[in-house]
Amino acid sequence: MAIATATIVAMPIVAVAWIAFADGDDSWRHVMTTIVPRATGRTVELLSFTGLLTAVFGTLTAWLVTTFEFPLRRTLSIILILPLAVPSYLAAYAFGEFFDFTGPLQSTYRLLFGYQTSRDYWFPDIRSMGGAVFVLGSVLYPYVYLACRTMFLMQGRAAADVARTLGAGPAKVFWRIQIPMARPAIMVGLTLVMMEAMNDIGAVEFLGINTLTFSVYYTWLNRGSLAGAAQIATMMLAFVALLILLERMARRSQRFSSSKTTTSVNDMTRLRLRGAPAAAATILCSLPVLSGFIIPVIVLGGFAMRRLEAYSDPRLLSALFNSIMVATAAAFTAAAIGFLLSYSTRCDRSSGTMLASRVASLGYGIPGTVLAIGVLVPLASFDNALDGYLRSSFGVSTGLLLSGSGFAIVYACTVRFMAMAEGTLDAGFQKLSPHMDMASRTLGRSRGQTLWLILLPNMKPAMLTATLLVFIETMKELSATILLRPFNFNTLATLVYEDASRAKIEDSSVAAMIIIAVGLIPILFVSRSIERRS
């Protein structure tokens, strides 16, 4: 089973490479000289500055809420992860309206200083590289925050207390003790941030940033060159492999004890801030939530409240139905395959099974646009072969049976989010002692009976969590869906994208708020779990 799953995940990657290298040298020369250099430069710039912004705010906020006590600390520690519920393309659309000439910010600015036109003053342009970094950093910093906060909680207070008894102040303890110990967590968070930033297509297109992801989309659909798109996709795969390699190298040979100190009182004692430092800590932890969650929700929610009739719009209801159907199918498929993969690893720890498990987890690192190319080609080849056979043998045409339906989207989302489902289920299996299996077998149960009667009932919470996570991520997915959807087939994400492309942000606000509301479900679960553990 593990090998079969690994094959399913690896097939899109193989397909992309085959298309890219099957074309002639002229196509490669054109892509490498006219498209890749500029797009690569913009991509590196975007990833570098977004990574820097998320590292600073994610690490600082995690350190503040775990080390100090200040006003609203408990509330802020929970809501700091809320921006994860806002997809980057929705944040870009909201900030586009918020920073627009007719938006509330510039309108207030003109009112205060008496300006009449945009020529009378200078104002930052959100449709720029700086704007893209700000938007992506605002919604992606929680990846670093979550990883660092977990690491700071696991470290306990022992190392920091020892450093302070030797005369080190809080700032020195932070730079010399806690940051080096949290370096692996920071690198894990940054890797996720950069993968998500590279996968984005809606925000970068709206803000006018020509990244590698947008180049794949433009080359395939606007220029009609599938081979050129595949060649750019191979560059993106190399980029992803480099990110993963750098993350592994950064954590190489680093081992830190994660056990807490035996004195639980010391672990939970935080330094109380008063006066200006306390106010500064509250403001610093509030700013990311304001930019990443509150402003997008206020902007889009305000539009949605003025369009109550849109809730019964047939386009919205059709897109909602399609989103639920696709997300449900992908969630159950990924959870079922992830369960079998985790169970295979539990029963067989051989090198082949472990390697297949790692390959099956690579999907999350593959950008959606790359997956779209890799999924479409084998499915279209199968459809054409089946249609040709049935035409010649029975005179029946099946058409595009798989590639022309929602199956392609389900396949792509299953591959992309397989790592999420498999990781959740593997963590659930690790909490179940292998002695349970042994005890069941000694009492006369077969392996199948043990799985059905013992393991499955105990794995229900993990199964529910894995299914829910994949469902919600599929509801938000845009990059693969926009390229693989059949004609006249919209999900909530593509409906928002279409309206935004026609400068009708207000019309897309209802669908956007539904996506955000659905995305809040796992966020609240995670917040509650972390707060309980802390």
Image: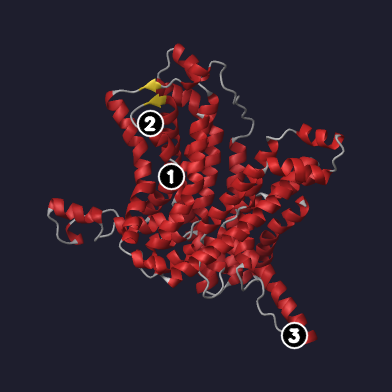
Per the rendering, the mark at residue 32 is: none
Q: Residues within 10 Å of mark 3 (few under 14, many from 20)?
A: few
* Mark 3 vs mark 1, CA separation in Å: 53 Å
529 or 415, nearer to the observer: 529
The structure residue drawn at horizontal position 34% and vertical position 41%, both measured from the top left corner, is 287
N-term-proximal mark, 3 vs 1 = 1
- The residue singled out by tag 3 in the image is 391
The answer to whether marks 3 and 1 mark residues whose Cβ atoms lie closer than 8 Å is no
Per the rendering, the mark at residue 73 is: 2
Q: Amino acid at mark 1?
A: Leu
Q: Position of residue 533 (x, y in %)?
A: 53, 30
* Mark 2 vs mark 1, CA separation in Å: 15 Å
- The residue singled out by tag 1 in the image is 82
The answer to whether marks 2 and 1 mark residues whose Cβ atoms lie closer than 8 Å is no
* Mark 2 vs mark 3, CA separation in Å: 68 Å
N-term-proximal mark, 2 vs 1 = 2
Q: Amino acid at mark 3?
A: Arg
N-term-proximal mark, 2 vs 3 = 2
Q: Residues within 10 Å of mark 2 (few under 14, many from 20)?
A: some
469 or 40, nearer to the observer: 469
The structure residue drawn at horizontal position 66% and vertical position 69%, both measured from the top left corner, is 377
Dot 3 lies on which element?
A: helix
Residue at the far bottom in the pictured view: 395
